[in-house]
Image (spheres, helix red, strand yellow):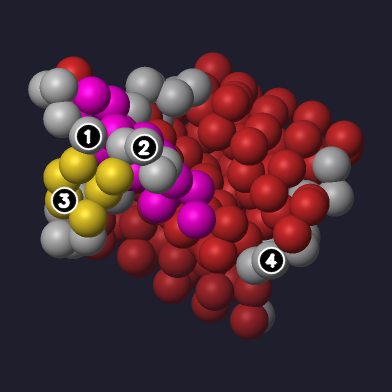
Amino acid sequence: MNTIKELDATMTETATVTDFSISDMWAQLPRYTDEANKLGTSINSLYKATTLYYQQGLQTNEAMALGIETIKMARVANMDAAQATDLMTAALRGFNMELNETSAIRINDVYSELAAVTAADTDEIGIAISKTASIAHSANMEFETTAAFLSQIIETTREAPETAGTAMKTIVARFSEVKKLYSEGQITGTDEEGEVVNVNKI
């Protein structure tokens, strides 16, 4: 009974943020049930994951494909669906990737590979990426390179992933400022926060 109530609440939430009715969402139950069974997760978790993608304007097939990949990430990293969706979205949006299954698989593959070869796990890498993605992308860093750097920082320092991500963000900002100053023939300047930047010292 509780499961039905939870499902109905999630479907109501989905209907609220989409053009679907609650009846439309219940009609999709067989498909969600089948996919959830394949993933070894709850039907409600898959509905919740896809709801967050519906909110971003995706259609059913796209939302379902991304939801499935997100649940895979959640299962590997022992996260809940909402947290996994946030981290997946941060990587996709931050690096300006297409919101599709191919991009989600790319993120999962990179996180899994790095978690296998370093002492950083998927959720740590994802959290660190969420702090760094936008500025790294604007500095033309590749997703794979950024994730590898962050994994190494986490493994070496064993600092919190938020700290590693913020540190990388600061490093990238500094080098971006150096590049700008150098291109203008300057060796000193100030960054966006008013701090002095000295090319020679950096």
Q: Which residue is mark 3?
A: 190
Q: Earlier in the sequence, mark 2 or mark 4?
A: 4
Structural crowding at the residue carrying mark 3, measured as other residues with C-alpha within 10 Å and reported as few (<14), some (14–19) or many (≥20): few
| Tag 4–tag 1 contact (CB < 8 Å) | no
| Tag 1–tag 2 contact (CB < 8 Å) | yes
Q: Residue at x 16, y 51 (%)?
A: 190
Label disc, if present, on residue 159 of the rendered structure: 4
Eye-nearest disc, 4 or 3: 3
Q: Position of residue 17 (x, y in %)?
A: 24, 56
Q: Nearer the viewer, residue 159 or 115?
A: 159
As measured in the structure, the alpha-carbon distance from the residue carrying label 2 to the one carrying label 4 is 28 Å
Tell whether position 169 is magenta: yes
Q: Which residue is mark 2?
A: 200
Tell whether position 28 is magenta: no
Q: Residue at x 29, y 56 (%)?
A: 15
Q: Position of residue 24 (x, y in %)?
A: 36, 46
Give the extent of the magenta segment.
Answer: 167-182
Q: Residue at x 58, y 57 (%)?
A: 164
| Tag 3–tag 1 contact (CB < 8 Å) | no
Q: Earlier in the sequence, mark 1 or mark 2?
A: 1
30 is higher (above) or lower (below) than 180: below
